[in-house]
Image (tube, rainbow, N blue to C red):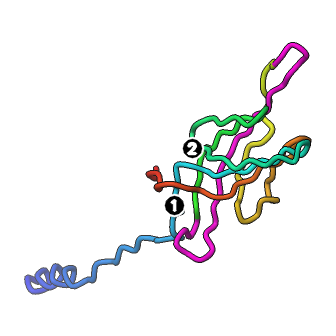
Amino acid sequence: MAEEAQSEPEMAQEKPKPKVVTPTGPPRPDRGPMAILRVLDKVTAETLRFEAPVGRRVRYKSLVFQVRACQTWAPDSADPRPSAYVVIDADIGSANGVVGSKQVYKGWMFAKAPDVHALQHPVYDAWLESCEGTPAPTA
């Protein structure tokens, strides 16, 4: 019996340890601190290209843009895919001036598909051109 007791622990030591596999998943996008947006005033046919830092409000006429995130998938490839989460408010006016603002857009904009999730406004069109700058830390 003593021999059987010794062989059981030896057998337990011979079992291979299970391999730990960590899923890698798709690569993470590069996050940038700034979005490059373009706006068209449909009344005057004026276009303006401007920088919108992430987290800051930027005004264009009666629109106020706030970019919450700007990221580029596959930034080192020949076909990078920038996208930005943007909130756009429009001033609501009266004969006496500005009364308040109304949210007219909230969602993702895609530089490669500007017609997908586009701003629908009677006076303005707006779209994302790119994400620029040194990549921001990912959280």
Residue, disc 2: 54
- Range covered by the magenta-colored residues: 73-97
Quickly name the residue at label 1: 30
Magenta stretch, main secondary structure, is: strand
Q: Nearer the viewer, residue 26 or 56?
A: 56
How would you rate the neighbour count of disc 1 (Cα within 10 Å): few for under 14, some for 14-19, many for 20 or more? some
Residue 119 in view in this figure: no
Q: Specify the amino acid type for callout 1.
A: Asp
Q: Residue at x 70, y 50 (%)?
A: 49
From the viewer's side, name the closer residue of 73 and 17: 73
The local secondary structure at tag 1 comes to: strand
Quadrant of the drawing holding the N terminus: bottom left
Q: Amino acid at mark 2?
A: Val
Question: Picture quarter containing residue 105?
Answer: top right
**Side of 70 where 115 appears, left or right:** right
The residue depicted at 41 percent of the width and 70 percent of the height is 22
